[in-house]
Amino acid sequence: MTVQFLKEGDTAMVVQFGDVIDRALSDRVLRLSRRIRALGIPGVTDLVPTFRSLLVHYDPLIVGGDELKGRLEGLLESSDAQRQEARQWTIPVCYEGEYAPDVDDVAQASGLTAIQVVEQHAGTLFHVYMLGFVPGYPYMGDLPPALVLPRRSNPRTRVPPGSVAIASVMTAIYPLESPGGWHLIGATPIRLFDADAEDPALLRPGDKVRFQPIGSAEYAGIRKAVQAGDFEMVCERVAS
């Protein structure tokens, strides 16, 4: 698909790369976002990566739409001069009891045992495609084929914060209490979104995530440390 430049009013432009959920397409979106940030184009005020496009907010008093389009087209042809790195997080998840209300249903629907569901989910290195739905909500792929299921037929009106869920080819973590129709297979005690923090969302597009199974006692201990401000997440830098 040819890259399209779509106007979103007078202050934003969508650079659309395709119409599918695809890692290669996501890499193109993130590559352009990285190049724009590195160049520091005057007038660009914000960048929002999605599955298939990059939303570019700009100040029309500083840069016009046609000028911005020309500069972005030039960046599409450029190459990254340096080796790129991504942040890789290990996130603790309890896949037991009250924290995993749908894990048995997922196991039955996928033809696996509950233990195998956990093994497949925790054994996958996930890619953060985008944030959306509610602040800090990460859409992460890609699920192993056996765990690819449609959304629940009866969505919940309230999903607890920290719930780890799956639907279609994605997994996600609910940062805040909200409605939700995904299958809840675990929960993490860490905080995904803090409005008072300098960088409110823990995860960002392009990050890598691996889930570490923990028991309910360890979950309670980590949650207590998080609430006291004594728990710090650590991430590695890995080749992108």
Image: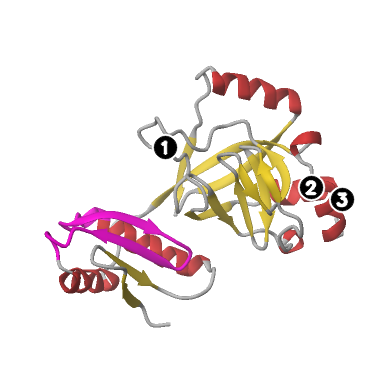
Q: What colouring method underlies this structural image? A: secondary structure
Above or below residue 230? Residue 4 is below
Identified at 65% across, 50% down, the residue is 180
Q: CA distance from mark 2 to mark 1?
A: 29 Å
Q: Which mark is residue 113?
A: 3
Q: Amino acid at mark 3?
A: Thr
58 in magenta: yes
The answer to whether 32 appears left or right of 178 in the picture is left
Q: Which mark is residue 138?
A: none
Q: Residue 236, position in %: x, y?
A: 48, 39
Disc tally is 3
The answer to whether 60 appears left or right of 90 in the picture is left
Q: Nearer the viewer, mark 3 or mark 1?
A: 1
**Residue for badge 2:** 102
- What residue range appears in magenta? 37-63
Above or below residue 159? Residue 17 is below
Q: Residue furthest bottom?
A: 2
Q: Which mark is residue 200?
A: 1
Q: Amino acid at mark 2?
A: Asp
Identified at 53% across, 73% down, the residue is 20
Q: Residue 38, position in %: x, y?
A: 24, 54
Q: CA distance from mark 2 to mark 3?
A: 12 Å
Q: CA distance from mark 3 to mark 1?
A: 37 Å
Residue 127 in which image quadrant:
bottom right
Identified at 81% across, 35% down, the residue is 97
Secondary element type, mark 2 = loop
Identified at 49% across, 37% down, the residue is 193
